[in-house]
Amino acid sequence: MTSASSLAVFLLPGWQNSDAQHWQSRWEALYGYTRVQQHDWNHPKSGDWQIQLEEAVLATPEQQKIVLVAHSLGCQLVARWAHYSHHVHRVQAALLVAPPDTQAEPIHHLLPTWQPIPTERIPFTSAVLASRNDPYCTLARAQWMAEHWGSRLDVVGDLGHINSDSGLGDWSEGHSCLQALIKQA
């Protein structure tokens, strides 16, 4: 297990960023995690987002392991970046919450640079947290992504897209999942 002081936890919000009520924003305030900023949250380009993540990784001291906490399109970012980066060895684990199906309605035509969904195995410990009633991804597709990525799949109930609309507050259950994943890695 790695001590908390030797970890850098990066928050990777999805399309349109995470608002103040989103659990990611609350974790940023509560635990001091670092949000990886994107140049354009409203018109996301896969390559641009990968560059921002790569720069955040390279700016982190070499002795620190990195944990990624992704929501929605941030999950697709992790899967894409992990395939192309030469620095994946720096990452200890990734929590992938509510990955969207970017190949399905209603969003496929809005996110052309995010298709196809990566099918390569993610080379570090990862877990997908999925909701049974996510409007942007069926449970079957979340399972398909988890299988291809080599991620454990945890179904967290009927929480919609696991965002601000889900009314999760600080989402202590999600943070417990993160802590367990870090211990497992």
Image (cartoon, rainbow, N blue to C red):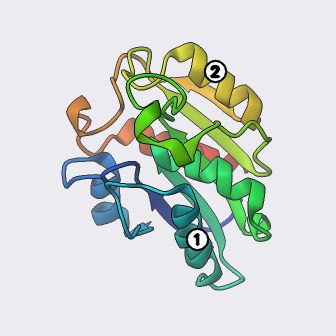
Q: Is residue 80 above or below residue 29?
A: above
Q: Residue 44's x, y, as percent?
A: 42, 55
For image coordinates 73% across by 69% down, the residue present is: 90
For image coordinates 69% across by 40% down, the residue present is: 118
39 or 94: which is nearer to us? Answer: 39
Residue bearing mark 2: 143
Crowding around mark 2 (Cα neighbors within 10 Å: few <14, some 14 to 19, many 20+) is many
For marks 2 and 1, the one nearer the N-term is 1
Q: Quadrant of residue 159?
A: top left
Q: Is residue 84 above or below residue 158?
A: below
SS class, disc 1: helix
Q: Residue 170's x, y, as percent?
A: 28, 46
183 or 114: which is nearer to us? Answer: 114
Q: Are marks 2 and 1 in contact (CB under 8 Å)?
A: no
Residue bearing mark 1: 51
Q: Is residue 169 above or below residue 132?
A: below
Q: Residue 3's x, y, as percent?
A: 62, 68
For image coordinates 64% across by 81% down, the residue present is: 58
For image coordinates 64% across by 36% down, the residue present is: 117
171 or 110: which is nearer to us? Answer: 110
- Badge 1 amino acid: Ile
Q: Is residue 144 left or right of residue 20?
A: right
Q: Is residue 114 left or right of residue 72?
A: right
- Badge 2 amino acid: Gln
On residue 87, the disc is none
